[in-house]
């Protein structure tokens, strides 16, 4: 029953190469944009960065979650999640331009602006370039430590067949997941919420935790539907696994909706000008259209579709839905970031589309390169026999 | 195996298996052999089993959906009636029909009624509670709650022929095959 060596499909090498070419071509386009409109370049760059780092960190969250809960659904996607977390060094490098563009991106870099009101002046000790960079360094150090340890123990488990590695991965994942949620909350406040320093929302970080996990699971489902059509995963993955991932996708869609609506409801009920301004800027003209599209296509349609058992069990239908959610996630990030600069008029730049594609090329090139480095199944995990057993116990 | 029993006194014939994989494989073969009135019994739910015995659809999802929709509408219009028609109070200058504020309760009522529909609908469709069932006439059937897996071909199956059914079940490598009396 247990066969050694789940060698990843060789096509991954070609995909990595093609993604790199796409990434470089669009990066050149984006670089031209930097000369055309420097400020817009950084805004679009932030959109791309927030979207793709979301898949990296969402994968880290799901990886920790599956170590803690166990279950065959997680064992099968573990190598994909691990490869996603190994894009973290790339995201560290890609963060450097944000530091360079700090003055173009964040209004709190302007001290005259921050002294306009007492409320803003109080925030200077937190919102200043030095502390911003130190905090980002702490987040990245913590995330890298978690991802590094989990990937390292997983590799040791493949090589040595010792039970203690499973225990060690669980030991990292428990506290790791708790601090991951805290660190993502702070990152969301720093990178996105502080675009409007006068506005605050306490649930903002949790919206990002849910949304980034949703991105990561959608991406993973897409990868699994691709892998399932090829050896060796076509012998492992069954319809019931897609059913499990579909259920988790439904749960994350609902979790994101719950957080996002809670924020809206509280601000709507409180009806305070400094809070409602955030939504007022995001509900007129094109921003309103995007907001409606997000409600329909990132909540209502996936929610209703995922109620159907047949849709969850079909790899093709689930993958199509996952692709839709990923596209909506890009729009959602644009909707979160861009209205901070275009409060009065809707404005969508070509760079807002080019930047996520450019960064995506580099990200997927790294991901595919990392994915083909290891066996696609953790062959020495205690649960492996259960994963390969054709009948599943629920 | 008892020979020559008339079908009228039989509920069916039952095969006992040691593991879920065997049961699912046996159920698939039995279905493929043309038997339609078959049932499987196991200590825990096996998702593949219901497909294997040709159990495709139940009315339960529809019952739950209707329950959820009624619960949602009921929850919403309960609040609408209270806040707009029966006892309107001006809260912070907001419209009486403050639908965003109604959403949490609407959602809770949807879940509540859907969950009740699921439980009660499941009991009704399964004709539960049912203190007596004929399969308990089989000698080792109590093990179905512990570590054994059972497959029954019921005598109401149009293709049912006692000797043929027993012979067929024995080809599936069961631990034993027994008659289940009426």
Image (tube, rainbow, N blue to C red):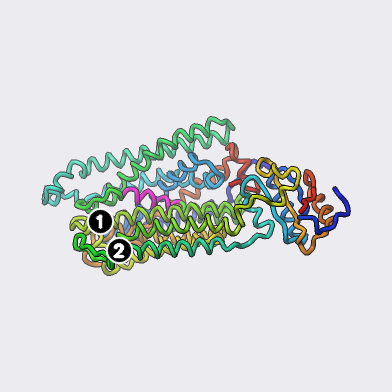
Residue furthest to the bottom: A285
- The image's mark for residue B82 is 2
State the separation of the CA atoms marked 1 and 2: 23 Å
- The image's mark for residue B159 is none
Q: Residue at x 49, y 63 (%)?
A: B65
Could you tell me which secondary element the residue under label 1 belongs to?
Answer: helix
In terms of depth relative to the viewer, which is nearer, A200 or B175? B175
> Residue A348 occupies which quadrant of the picture?
bottom left
The answer to whether residue A280 is above or below residue A185 is below
Residue furthest to the front: B131
Residue A316, given in percent of the width and then of the height, sits at 55, 61
Image quadrant where one finds the N terminus of chain A: top right
> Residue B38 occupies which quadrant of the picture?
bottom right
In terms of depth relative to the viewer, which is nearer, A216 or B69? B69
Residue furthest to the right: B4
> Residue A334 occupies which quadrant of the picture?
bottom left
Could you tell me which secondary element the residue under label 2 belongs to?
Answer: helix
Residue A167, given in percent of the width and then of the height, sits at 51, 32
Q: Which residues are magenta?
A: A204-216
């Amino acid at each position: 029953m247990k066969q050694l060596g789940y060698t990843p499909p060789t096509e991954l090498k070609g995909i990595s190469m093609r993604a790199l070419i796409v990434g470089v071509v669009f990066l050149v386009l984006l670089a031209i944009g930097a000369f055309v409109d420097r400020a817009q370049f950084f805004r679009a760059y932030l959109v791309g960065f927030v979207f793709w780092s979301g898949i990296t960190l969402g994968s880290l969250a799901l990886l920790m979650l599956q170590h803690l809960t166990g279950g065959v659904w997680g064992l099968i996607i573990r190598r994909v999640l691990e490869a996603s977390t190994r894009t973290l060094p790339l995201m560290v490098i890609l963060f450097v331009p944000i530091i360079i563009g700090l003055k173009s991106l964040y209004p709190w870099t302007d001290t005259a602006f921050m002294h306009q009101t007492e409320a803003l002046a109080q925030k200077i000790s937190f919102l200043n370039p030095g502390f911003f960079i130190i905090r980002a360094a702490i987040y990245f150090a913590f995330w890298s430590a978690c991802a590094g340890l989990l990937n390292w123990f997983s590799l040791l488990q493949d090589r040595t067949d010792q039970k203690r590695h499973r225990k060690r991965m669980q030991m990292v994942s428990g506290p790791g997941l708790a601090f991951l949620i805290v660190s993502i909350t702070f990152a969301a406040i720093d990178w996105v919420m502080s675009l409007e320093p006068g506005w605050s929302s306490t649930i903002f970080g949790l919206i990002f935790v849910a949304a980034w996990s949703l991105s990561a699971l959608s991406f993973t489902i897409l990868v699994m539907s691709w892998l399932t059509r090829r050896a060796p995963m076509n012998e492992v993955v069954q319809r019931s696994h897609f059913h499990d991932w579909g259920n988790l996708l439904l749960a994350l869609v609902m979790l994101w909706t719950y957080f996002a609506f809670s924020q809206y409801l509280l601000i709507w009920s409180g009806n305070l000008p400094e809070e409602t301004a955030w939504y007022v800027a995001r509900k007129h003209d094109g921003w309103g259209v995007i907001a409606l599209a997000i409600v329909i296509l990132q909540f209502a349609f996936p929610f209703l579709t995922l109620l159907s058992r047949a849709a969850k069990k079909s790899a093709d239908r689930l993958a199509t839905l996952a692709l839709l959610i990923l596209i909506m996630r890009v729009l959602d990030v644009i909707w979160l970031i861009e209205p901070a600069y275009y409060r009065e008029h809707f404005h969508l730049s070509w760079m807002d589309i080019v930047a996520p594609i450019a960064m995506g090329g580099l990200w997927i090139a790294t991901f595919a390169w990392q994915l083909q480095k290891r066996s696609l199944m953790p062959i020495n995990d205690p649960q492996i026999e259960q994963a390969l057993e054709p009948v599943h116990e629920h | 195996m008892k020979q020559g029993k008339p079908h009228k006194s039989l509920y069916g014939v039952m095969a006992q298996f040691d593991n879920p994989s065997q049961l699912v494989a046996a159920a698939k073969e039995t279905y493929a052999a043309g038997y339609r009135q078959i049932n499987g019994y196991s200590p825990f739910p096996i998702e593949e089993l219901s497909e294997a015995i040709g159990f495709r659809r139940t009315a339960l999802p529809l019952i739950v959906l209707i329950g959820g929709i009624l619960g949602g509408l009921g929850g919403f219009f309960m609040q609408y009636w209270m806040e707009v028609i029966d006892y309107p109070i001006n809260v912070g200058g907001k419209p009486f029909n403050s639908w965003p504020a109604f959403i949490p309760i609407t959602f809770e009522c949807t879940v509540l009624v859907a969950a009740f529909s699921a439980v009660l609908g499941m009991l009704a469709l399964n004709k539960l509670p049912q203190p007596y069932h004929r399969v308990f006439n089989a000698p080792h059937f109590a093990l179905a709650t512990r570590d054994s897996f059972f497959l029954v071909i019921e005598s109401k199956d149009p293709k049912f022929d006692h000797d043929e059914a027993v012979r067929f079940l024995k080809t599936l490598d069961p631990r034993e095959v027994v008659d289940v009396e009426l």
